[in-house]
C-alpha cells in the first residue's frame, strides 16, 4: 500500500510541479491520502515502524505542497500551516466515528455479544464506557473493538451524547 501511494505521489510531483499549492494539496488528498486511508478503520497499524512508513509519505507530500525542501524546515509546522492532521489522528477519528455509527445503529454492524457496557458513571467518566477485554495477543489487542473501546472510554460525556453524526465528527476532529 505504501509503495503504491509513493508511486502516486511521484506521479503527482512529476506532473504538477508548477501548479499552485492548493492544487497540489487537492491532488494529494484525492489521489494519495485516499489510498493510504482505504479501509484504515479496520487495519489501523499499531507498530511504530508501520505508522512511521505511512506518515513518511505525508511528510514528503507536505514538502511538495509547500515547496519547502530545506533540511532545517519543520515539516510538522508546515503540515499545521496547510491544515493537514496526521494520518494516525485521522485513523483514530475514523475508528471513533465508526463506533458512534455502530452504537447508534447507523450501520449494519452489530456490537458483538462479548462487549458489555460498564453501565455506571462516575464524576469523571461517562456511563457509556465498556468493560475492557482481556487479550493475549497483540493482533487482537490492537484490533478494531478493543482499541476503539479504549479510545471511546476516554471521550468526554458531552461528545458521546451528541445527537447527530456531523456534530460528533466535528467534536472528535477538534480533540
Image (cartoon, grey):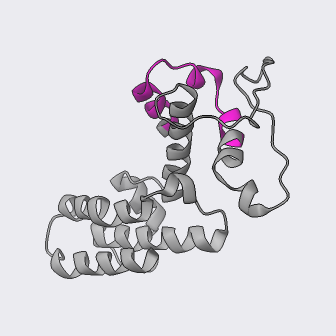
Instruction: Using the image, determine if residue 1 lies above or below residue 128.
Output: below
Start-end of magenta stretch: 150-172
Position of residue 11 measured from the top left corner of the image (x, y, whole percent):
24, 80
The image quadrant that residue 130 belongs to is top right
Q: From the viewer's perspective, is 1 left or right of 88?
A: left
Position of residue 93 measured from the top left corner of the image (x, y, whole percent):
52, 44
Q: Nearer the viewer, residue 166 or 62?
A: 166
Q: Nearer the viewer, residue 134 or 159?
A: 134
Q: Is residue 30 magenta?
A: no
Q: From the viewer's perspective, is 170 left or right of 89?
A: left
Q: Identify the residue shown where x is 22% and y is 63%.
A: 21
Instruction: Let me know if residue 65 appears in the view.
Output: yes
The image quadrant that residue 2 belongs to is bottom left
Q: Is residue 153 magenta?
A: yes
Q: Identify the residue shown where x is 76% and y is 37%.
A: 114
The image quadrant that residue 111 belongs to is top right
Instruction: Using the image, determine if residue 93 lies above or below residue 76.
Output: above
Amino acid at each position: 500500500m505504501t509503495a503504491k501511494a509513493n508511486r502516486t505521489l511521484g506521479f503527482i510531483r512529476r506532473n504538477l510541479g508548477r501548479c499552485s499549492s492548493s492544487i497540489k494539496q487537492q491532488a494529494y488528498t484525492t489521489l494519495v491520502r485516499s489510498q493510504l486511508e482505504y479501509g484504515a478503520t479496520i487495519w489501523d497499524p499499531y507498530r511504530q515502524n508501520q505508522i512511521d512508513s505511512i506518515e513518511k509519505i505525508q511528510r514528503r507530500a507536505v514538502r511538495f505542497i509547500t515547496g519547502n525542501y530545506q533540511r532545517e524546515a519543520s515539516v510538522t509546522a508546515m503540515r499545521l500551516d496547510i491544515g493537514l492532521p496526521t494520518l494516525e489522528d485521522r485513523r483514530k477519528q475514523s475508528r471513533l466515528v465508526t463506533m458512534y455509527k455502530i452504537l447508534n445503529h447507523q450501520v449494519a454492524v452489530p456490537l458483538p455479544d462479548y462487549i458489555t457496557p460498564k453501565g455506571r458513571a462516575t464524576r469523571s467518566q461517562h456511563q457509556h464506557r465498556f468493560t475492557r477485554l482481556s487479550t493475549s495477543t497483540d493482533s487482537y489487542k490492537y484490533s478494531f473493538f478493543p482499541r476503539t473501546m479504549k479510545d471511546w472510554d476516554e471521550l468526554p460525556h458531552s461528545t458521546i451524547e451528541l445527537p447527530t453524526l456531523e456534530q460528533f465528527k466535528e467534536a472528535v476532529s477538534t480533540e
